[in-house]
Image (tube, rainbow, N blue to C red):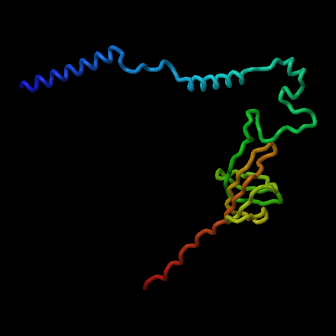
Amino acid sequence: MRGMRGTAGLLVLGIVGLGSAWACGDAAPKPEGPSAKHREGRSEVLRGLMASKERAAPDNLKAAGGEAAGTPMAGQPAPEGTGGSGRPELQGWAAGRVSWVGDDEVLFVDGQGEEREVVVEPGARLRRDEQPAELRDLREGDELRVTYEATGKGWLALDLEAVPARKAPEPEPSPPPLR
């Protein structure tokens, strides 16, 4: 019993000692607010946001000409491949079965049953059955996967992959009836 009192006493003294050290503030001081690195990062983000909201006075743009307004000058083609945000034009892919092959285009029926047309220019990559191929190698019924670029004129093929049409499995011959 006496041993229990001693242990309990030491435990109480330890708790009181730790509590007083904590209450007196002997612990290491915590830094106030974010670090300098975080503050610099926030400042950079805010500067970027503010810069995107800045607008030039319309009179200054008129005086500077089309270059300052961001419009191409007469006789200069607009840079292709970028929209207003600087992102490349839309790209996508589609898959289906070839229904017709022309000199520079392919018609295919996609998974929703819609007929799609894609123009194939000489720079497009074309493969059939995992081998380099030409457009004339495609056949009606081939399975097709095309990566395209959406342009004002329609879909422009960047990459075409075709797999020869699979033959429907023939039913197994039934064995002769047993007598």
Identity of the residue drawn at 76% across and 66% down: 137
What residue appears at the point 19 percent right and 20 percent down from the top-left corner? 12
Instruction: Name the residue nearer the viewer: 178 or 118.
Output: 118
Percent across and percent down for residue 145 are 68, 56
| Number of numbered tags placed on the structure image | 0
Task: Return the residue found at the far top.
Answer: 24
Task: Give residue 142's position: percent from left, percent from top.
Answer: 69, 63
Residue 64 x %, y %: 89, 23
Q: Is residue 106 left or right of residue 177?
A: right
For residue 102, above or below residue 26: below
Residue at (93, 34) in percent of width and height: 74
Q: Residue furthest right?
A: 75
Q: Residue at x 90, y 37 (%)?
A: 76
Q: In what quadrant of the picture does the C terminus appear? A: bottom left
Which image quarter is the N terminus in? top left
What is the quadrant of residue 146 in the picture? bottom right
In the image, 104: left or right of 50?
A: right
Q: Quadrant of residue 18?
A: top left
* Residue 139 spot, x, y in % from top left: 74, 65
Vertically, is 128 above or below 110? Answer: below
